[in-house]
Amino acid sequence: MKAAAYRTPRIGIDSVQHQARMTELWETEPGLKGFLSTVDHKHIGTRYIVTAFVFLVFGGLEALLMRLQLAGPNKELLSPEQYNQLFSTHGMTMIFLYALPILSGFSNYLWPLLLGSRDMAFPRLNAFSYWIYLAAGIFLYVGFLMGNGPNDGWFNYVPFAERDFNPGLNQDFYSLGMVLFGISTTVGAANFLVTAMRTRAPGMSLDRMPILIWGTLTANVANLLVVPAVSLAFFLLWMDRQFGTHFFQPANAGQPLLWQHLFWIFAHPWVYAIVLPAMGMVSDGLPVFCRRPVVGYTLLVLSTVATMILGFGVWVHHMFATGLPTMGMAFFSGASLVIVMPSAVAIFAWLATIWLGRPVVTTAFLYFASMILLFVIGGVSGFMTASVPVDWQLTDTYFVVAHIHYVLIGINVFPVLGAVYFWFPKMTGRLMDERLGRWNFWLTFIGFNLAFLPMHLTGLWGMPRRIYTYPDGMGWDTLNMITTVGSFLLAVGILLFVVNVVKSLKSGVLAGANPWDAHTLEWSVPSPPPPYNFAVIPTIASRHPLWEDRLGEPARSSINRGMLLDEGKETIATTPLDAEPDMVLEMPEDSYAPFLSAVATTLIFVGVLVKLWILAAVGAVATIGALVAWLWPRRELREREPPPVQEAVHG
Amino acid sequence: MSPTPLGYLEAAGERAQIILPLTWLTLTISILVCLVIAILLWMGVRRARLAGGAEQMRQVEIIHGAPGTQWFTVGLTITAVLLFITLVWTMVALAKGAAPAAPTAMTLDVTGMQWWWEIRYDSSEPDKTFITANEIHIPVGMPVLVRLHGGDVIHSFWVPRLSGKTDTIPGQTNITWLQASQPGRYRGQCTEYCGAQHAHMGFEVVAESPADFERWREHQLQPAPPPATPEQQRGMQLVQYRCGLCHEVRGTLAAAVSAPDLTHVMSRRTIAAGTLTNGAGVLGAWIEGAQQLKPGTLMPNQDLTAQQLSDTLAYLETLQ
Amino acid sequence: MADSPAIALAEPKDIPVGPIGRHGIGYWGVGTLVATEAALFAYLLFSYYYTGASAPHGWVLEPHPTLKLALPDTILLVASSGVAWIGERGILDQRPGQALWGFGGAFVMGVVFAIVQGYEWHSKPFSLGTSSFASLYYVTTGFHMAHVIVGLGILAALFLWTALDYFSPRRRLTISAGVLYWHFVDVVWLFVFSTYYISPYLGFGT
């Protein structure tokens, strides 16, 4: 019997036979084969999270070495070259290899579960984006371990990055590695956009989406549009270095500031991309611990979108000392002040949720609540630098280093740590230890503040950034020592976190489906979720499906009864605004194509790096082959005729 | 010198003085905002009913809770007002700081190089023009225009007590200005990462009375004195034929311009771009072991016999 | 009996299984690809205008670039979009012959475009390393050429799959997605052409 092109999906409830059939359709093969070919977002998300944490630890170790060098004046623990590679690699690792991938990992894992779907819109592309990320991370670290790490800061200004001043492979590793990394981010962004727009559960209109979805969505739309700027910048740099072009060299009418514009057009939106999803996690997690829906959902959504849009228009505030015309700087200064407003909305929403709720203090709550204060501290130092004249004193001093660490650790790391405590039970079926959690939290919080609060003063007292040592008599000695001590305390806090994760994986209390009595859809499925996520597709009637009874909502979501979609590996596609079901989506099987495409693509970059053109050509041919195999129209996916013969459906 | 020579919470120059009150305004607003939020957060968390873990969650019932509109109306209004004040003050300070109030009495051309500063004193009379390095003298109370040139990579010219930062960028000329309001010696530093010895690219600005400044300027215009002793004579030969490959000493055959001008090197308080306090012993250590004192610097270690070193120093000491 | 709250339950009737026509998530996917690549070209053109605006006099090396090759080449490329469209219509109207002619024709026109462009590069009086203007010219048109080559690969695949009789008016999202990409490549060329061949005549950078 040929499968019909149109169908009325059968409605039903879960059953043992249904679970068995669904598991058979969706489960990934165990062992190495499954590892290399899985397209299950839960596996991919977990990998992203673990890999990103590994990079967080690497970046942290780099920082601790730097702090030892800077603990006092005129130290000689590290040579200038070593220090300069360390601070550059630290920045690159944290901002690129940790900060976005960790959020991509959480979003990858959680989105289909939050959206009532069975996987992301493009599961194979999802796997590919992870493999490329891993490849780019390895590529960049091979450079570092060879003594050819980036050495011009993470923003890599020209002319110092040009061949004349930087003849080694350092810049070539960084440039090509970043282009490779950009591919991962871009395809990931496409996946998030289409998933959010087309694969939400029926009834989940835009104004019912969890705020984590909004945060990740805006961040990824932005990335889609700005990652090409930095990829282009690095490509042009590589061309200058290898092929004698003159994009950035003034001697041949090139323009050094072109680098800064292209870089910051990308990097400013990027810094919002690495915090908006985390802010979304707080907006979705904090209300659970305050036993009420979040205050100001609409304002929070609007402020997320507004921050991202305004975020495109402030990049010149990184260039206030470059001699730009006053009128231009005034505009960007104004925009940089205005962008404080949507951030303020989030602060008030979260504070109000605590005040007007009934807080229950758990470790996750502590992380989500404390980030409010750290956000504000980071935010006000940013507010100060938004004013051009003040920035002329503050920029390139440790004041900015204090600012960036408060916003990055405060608005990314703290929410991430809270998110682990919050979602660990869902992902593993076990709760993390709360007592160890308290120790972990307080050590991290105190260590972080001890390290970075004094840094504001270090900056106001003029210590420049990116110096491998400093003389005595500048007034910075004690402050630097305090910062070093704080950084080690912070490291111990993170170590305790890792200990808690490992311990809880083995012996944590069993969690059940909804240990926190939370309100979003992921808490309606078992912990850990079955490979197919939802036995039946839920229909959504509000922002908090699992709290509707208690809140006396007029309409109720249907969690236990819905479309079965068990005639293949299937989920439902819905319309972008109102989420009305409009198509049955046939999902791809596990496949080696993403892994092989990633390996082939990486081969191209390795060949290009060492100028072994034959290797690059082999990589190119292999990539084309893998892509053709991947995109070959398949009958099961209904990409071509004739339709597949339908298997008999079990009752 | 002050305990925090590079700090900018004190101003000794007009341009820094325009910025300082705005810095205090934004700093005060920032600290107050942090305190208020911290208090609100603390009070909010203290209202917690329970502490614990998952077991405690179901003991507290779910509520709708109040809409919390006032949090937004009050909070956003206060935020907007504070932002607006800052915005207006910023625009005023930006306009005031763009150019000096009075026409400038003097123009300097400063070129940033890895890892030192070349300073050229221009004049309408060509024989009143001279070049020096790493130590700038200016007359107190008079606006000085500074043209900033990029010699190799991007550096940034910063004297916190006198002015904010402006980059030196190859291919363009940036403008800043200095006007000291009191005499003193003010520390400056490069503040754009520029390579291995970015950490050791400082300089000093000496603000002195107009009379003292004129004396200094006249003195700087003099070429090097002829050597008076045989030692100095031998030293001069060494300086001309070795140091002269990169350095200039006016009045001798040493005429290269890729390294700091040494004609009056002993009149400067520091060497190696603010890294070391000047003196014969330090100078000797620098000549023999620049790579140990400032690793990666473009000056190679000089292989000299003890006699050669002593002669060289004897001559250099005459370059007051 | 008290009013029990309504339980929302989606019970769609007769919905498509898999993509029908252009309606499918794959089309959204190619749309995101087009968006990101369009942004890339926007940044390339930004680099041109920014560098040119701050460059010294005479930065544009050819104030009156010859249009002898470039203009017909542009017309050829735009026409190839029309031919690809005809090919897509062939699928929609179930005329496989027309489809093959369309994709094959667009492929050939694309190849001719590339050859002519290569000749144009060869006959320029400047090379990659002559100046920033030259570097931007070659890298921008080079990036476009790379996208043309990818597009040729896609047209070849569409030709092959059409010849294998894979598609129908209903199942042909792959075709529409591939043709969309080709249209995108052609539209981008109009922007690149206007920048490098027309704007000097209007006075930019000369």
Image: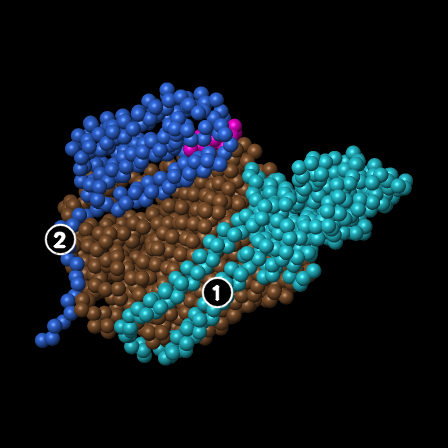
Q: Is residue A498 left or right of residue A458?
A: left
Q: Is residue C144 left or right of residue C172?
A: right
Q: Residues within 10 Å of mark 2 (few under 14, many from 20)?
A: few
Chain B drawn colour: cyan
Magenta segment boundaries in residue numbering: C129-140
- What kind of element bears circle 1? helix
| Residue A125 visible here | yes
Q: Is residue A119 above or below residue C123?
A: below
Label 1 with label 2: CB-CB less than 8 Å: no
Dividing the picture into quarters, in which one does residue A480 lie?
bottom right
| The label number, if any, that marks residue B30 in the structure image | 1
Q: Is residue A331 left or right of residue A631?
A: right
Closer to the camera in the image, C46 or A197: C46
Instruction: Give the residue furthest to the left.
Output: C1
In this figure, which residue is indicated by the disc labeled 2?
C13
Note the chain letter of the brown one.
A
Magenta stretch: includes residue A59: no
| Residue A423 visible here | no
Q: Three-letter amino acid code at disc 1?
A: Ser
Chain to which the residue tagged by mark 2 belongs? C
Q: Residue at x 47, y 26 (%)?
A: C61
Closer to the camera in the image, A563 or C139: C139
Q: Residues within 10 Å of mark 1 (few under 14, many from 20)?
A: many
Q: Position of residue A379 (x, y in %)?
A: 45, 61
Q: Is residue B147 above or below residue A519?
A: above
Note the chain letter of the blue one.
C
